[in-house]
Image: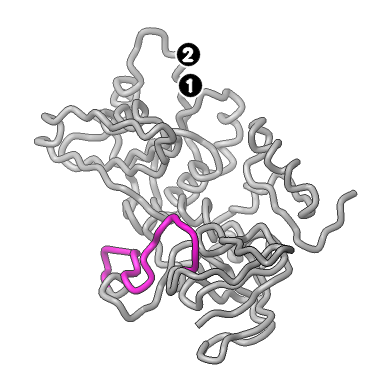
Amino acid sequence: MYYKIGRCCVRCRVVESVGERVEGFAVGDTVVPTFLGQCDSCAGCASAGSNMCSALPFVVGPGMRRDGTTRFRDSQGEPLHDFLAVSSFSQYTVVDVNQVVKVDPAVPPKLACLLGCGAGTGVGAAWRLAKVQPGSSVVIFGLGAVGLSVAQGAKMCGAAKIIGVDLNPDKEELGKKFGVTDFVNPSKLGESPLSQVIIEMTGGGADYCFECIGVASVMTEAFRSAKQGNGKTVILGLEKDGKPISLPSIEFLFGKCVMGSLFGGIKPKTDIPILAKKCMSKELELEKLITHEVGLQEINTAFDLLLQGKSLRCIIWMDKLAA
């Protein structure tokens, strides 16, 4: 049920060989490996309200998810475990058939690879999970690659007001390129609570709030910024310190809700090809996320750019030699 893929750029590959029992794929296919599986036969995959495959459940741990083994060895023959059962920082990898999506070979690899993680997560959160409605108001806390992808998804869905919240003033102009209509820098608000400013800007609270940073206090602020009655808060950020979220319980009585998100609620095999077509038709313009391109030998440079806040998405080409 496994096959080998290689070449191209991170998270967009070309099939090199196919396992004996694998169907629907052939050598030379252009594919996107994903950390989330889709078997299309379990209850989770059949559900319209879930993207969690129960036959190949998502786990953060060593080994292939089907049998817990590894297909990699180091030069001494010791086992090497893959990351999220994908291991995209390598020229070749072995992936379960349920964790790979075939895409049109006309889709540029550096565009297809964006859909396998952050960009797919952001667009999907607005499109599939929150189901942003035309004419609605959206607030995005954090305008990194995921947050900007949420903006693209909200714009695609017809949101009338898309407010970006970020401490970096440079994100104001950048956000406009992705569909952000208004910008708030919390450091410039003085004594005014951020949530109160958002409530005033939206005439009573936002229809949809997306937390894309991973800070518990910001998650609380996002919830407080949502509209009473039916305001949705979607959490995409991972709290790096594991802190609990503190939410005012009385506000739940007024109809607000909080939603968690894994991969933006999209089903990989179903939705990634759809998003790829939308990118090709320019309904989505995710290529603007690509700020740098390097070869595999320069991977540390890519991480440095990320840590320095100079990169949104850096494409790592497997066959590109260092300059």
* 21 up-or-down from 52: above or below: below
* 292 with respect to 289 (left or right): right
Q: Is residue 231 magenta?
A: no
**Viewer can see residue 301:** yes
Residue 89: x, y in percent? 66, 57
* 16 with respect to 130 (left or right): right
Helix, strand or loop under label 2: helix
* Residue at the (28%, 47%) spot, across then down: 259
* 184 up-or-down from 286: above or below: above
Task: Please state which of residues 264 and 38 is positioned toward the viewer in this rendering.
Answer: 38
The three-letter code of the residue at mark 1 reads: Asn
Helix, strand or loop under label 1: loop
Q: Which residue is under mark 2?
A: 188
Q: Quadrant of residue 176?
A: top right
View extreme (right): residue: 323
Q: How many marks?
A: 2
The numbered disc on residue 185 is: 1
The three-letter code of the residue at mark 2 reads: Lys
Q: How many residues crowd around disc 1 within 10 Å: few (fewer than 14), some, or many (20 or more)? A: some
**Viewer can see residue 163:** no
Q: For the residues labelled 2 and 1, say whether their Cβ atoms are less than 8 Å apart.
A: yes
Q: Which residues are magenta?
A: 47-64
Q: CA distance from mark 2 to mark 1?
A: 6 Å
* Residue at the (51%, 23%) spot, across then down: 167
Q: Main secondary structure of the magenta part?
A: loop
Task: Please state which of residues 189 and 48 is positioned toward the viewer in this rendering.
Answer: 48
* Residue at the (49%, 27%) spot, across then down: 166
